[in-house]
């Protein structure tokens, strides 16, 4: 993220605000869920699911835009996103394993 963030700010002056808003949303979402359920691990699990949902939604938008540009760009982006999703799956598995072990 530290490599991409300066480029994002150059292309759109609102990039920093959007990133900050995302972090704040997830932080307070976790706090609210933890307050309502009184379970730290459950709050973490639900927050992770929210993050994955939003992230996957953005991946879908990227797929749509890149395939509308051209088939080649769409296929190349698709390959990159598949590799990206594999790594994301490993991270998600690690988080859920930690949650299950803590319980």
Image (tube, rainbow, N blue to C red):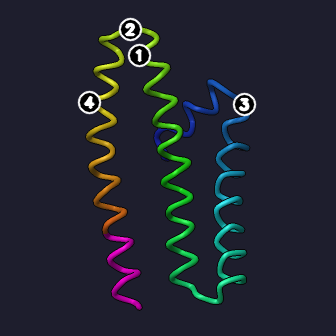
Q: Determine crowd level at label 3: few under 14, some 14-19, many 20+ residues with C-alpha closer than 10 A.
A: few
Q: Earlier in the sequence, mark 3 or mark 4?
A: 3
Picture quadrant where residue 71 is located: top left
Task: Look at the numbered disc 4 and give the secondary structure of its residue.
Answer: helix
The Cα–Cα distance between marks 2 and 3, rounded to whole angstroms, is 28 Å
**Disc 2 from disc 4: Cα separation:** 14 Å
Report the mark closest to the observer, 4 or 1: 1
Asked if residue 47 lies in the magenta stretch, the reply is no
Q: Badge 4: how crowded within 10 Å, few (<14), some, or many (20+)?
A: few
User: The C terminus is located in which quarter?
Assistant: bottom left
- Mark 2 or mark 4, earlier in chain: 2
Q: How many marks?
A: 4
Tag in front: 2 or 3: 2
Q: Which residue is mark 2?
A: 70
Q: Quadrant of residue 35?
A: bottom right
Q: Which residues are magenta?
A: 94-103
> Where in the figure is residue 89, as x and y percent of width and height?
31, 56
Residue tagged 4 = 79
Decide which of tag 2 and tag 3 comes sooner along the chain: 3
Residue nearest the viewer, comparing 1 with 29: 29
Query: Circle 1 is placed at which residue position?
Result: 67
Note whether 14 is above or below 49 in the view shown: above
**SS for callout 1:** helix
SS class, disc 3: loop
In the picture of the structure, the residue carrying the numbered disc 3 is 13
Quote the CA–CA distance across marks 3 and 4: 29 Å
Q: Closer to the camera: disc 3 or disc 1? A: 1
Q: Mark 2 and mark 1: span between their CA atoms?
A: 5 Å
Using the image, determine if residue 44 lies above or below residue 12: below
């Amino acid at each position: 993220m530290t490599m991409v963030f300066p480029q994002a700010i150059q292309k759109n002056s609102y990039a920093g605000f959007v990133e900050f808003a995302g972090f704040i949303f997830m932080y307070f979402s976790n706090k609210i869920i933890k307050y309502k359920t009184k379970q730290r691990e459950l709050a973490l699990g639900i927050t992770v699911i929210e993050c994955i949902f939003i992230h996957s939604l953005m991946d879908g938008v990227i797929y749509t835009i890149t395939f509308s540009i051209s088939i080649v760009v769409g296929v190349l982006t698709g390959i990159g996103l598949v590799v990206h999703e594999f790594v994301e799956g490993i991270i998600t598995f690690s988080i859920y394993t930690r949650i299950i072990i803590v319980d």
